[in-house]
Image (cartoon, rainbow, N blue to C red):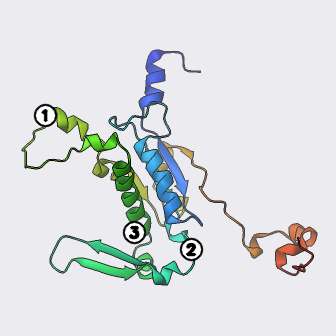
Amino acid sequence: MLRSRTAINSAVFSRRLWLLNAYKQTPQSVARQARRILYGEHKPIFHPQQDVGDRLVIINSKEIKVHGNMWEEKYFYENTARRNGSVRMVLREVHLLDPTKIVKSMVHAELKRGKQNHPIANMMVPKRRYAIYRTKNDDLHQRHMNTTLSLQQRLMVFAGGMETVPEVIKDDIYDELKPGQKVYKAIDEYSQYEIDNYPDIDGITDDANYF
C-alpha cells in the first residue's frame, strides 16, 4: 500500500508502459485501444489540456485481420508532400512490404480523429487566420505539449511477438491490455478431449439439430 504522498503522486502521474497484442485483431480496434492509452483516458486525472498519457507497445502487427475482402478491395493512400510522392496501394501489398505500416497509420488517424471530435481538445490548437511566430516562452507552447506528434513518439509497434521486443523495453512493461475482440481458436488448436466431447467443432454436427 502506498502511504507517502510522493509515492502516490508518482504512481498516478508516471508514464507506464502497456502491452497490446494485435493477434487476430482488426486495425480499428487496436487504434481505439491505443488512443485511450496514449491520451490517458484510462486515468482518473485525465484532462484534454494536460499531458497525462502513457506509452504503448504493440506486438504481432503482422497477424492482424480485416473484414471481408478488404486486403484486395481497400486501398492505402499516403502523400509525402514531395513531387510524385503520392502512394496508392492495396492493403495486401502494403502489409507485405511493412507489417507495421497499417497499424501505425490507423493509430495516427485515430489520434487526429479523437482530437477533432473532442470539444475541449480543439482549444489546444486554436485556428489562426494569420501566421504568428511563437517562442518556447509563450504560454501557448505549453498547451501544445499533448500534440499528435508527441503521442506518436510514445507508440512502439513490432511485427513479431515478444521475442522481437528488446529486453530493455520488456523490463519497463507494466501490464498487458485485454484485446478488444475475442480471439477464437483454429481447428488444429483444439485438444483431442475437446474434439471427442464437442463434435460440433470439426463441423460434422447436423445443422438442423444444432439449434
Labels 3, 2: front one: 2
As displayed, is residue 121 above or below residue 114? above
Q: Is the C-beta separation of discs 2 and 1 under 8 Å?
A: no
Quadrant in which residue 26 is drawn: bottom right
Q: Earlier in the sequence, mark 2 or mark 1?
A: 2
Residue 59 appears left or right of 152: right
Q: Nearer the viewer, residue 158 or 106?
A: 106
Q: Residues within 10 Å of mark 2 (few under 14, many from 20)?
A: few
Labels 1, 3: front one: 1
Residue shown at 43%/34% (left/top)?
46
Q: Is the C-beta separation of discs 3 and 2 under 8 Å?
A: no
Q: Can you identify the residue that label 2 sits on?
A: 67
Q: Earlier in the sequence, mark 3 or mark 2?
A: 2
Alpha-carbon span between mark 3 and mark 2: 18 Å
Residue 44: image location, x then y, percent: 49, 31
Alpha-carbon span between mark 2 and mark 1: 47 Å
Q: Can you identify the residue that label 1 sits on?
A: 138
Residue 187 appears left or right of 119: right
Residue shown at 40%/57% (left/top)?
110
Question: Which structural element holds mark 2?
Answer: loop
Residue 5: image location, x then y, percent: 46, 16
Q: Can you identify the residue that label 3 sits on?
A: 101
Residue 65: image location, x then y, percent: 56, 71
As displayed, is residue 171 above or below residue 7? below
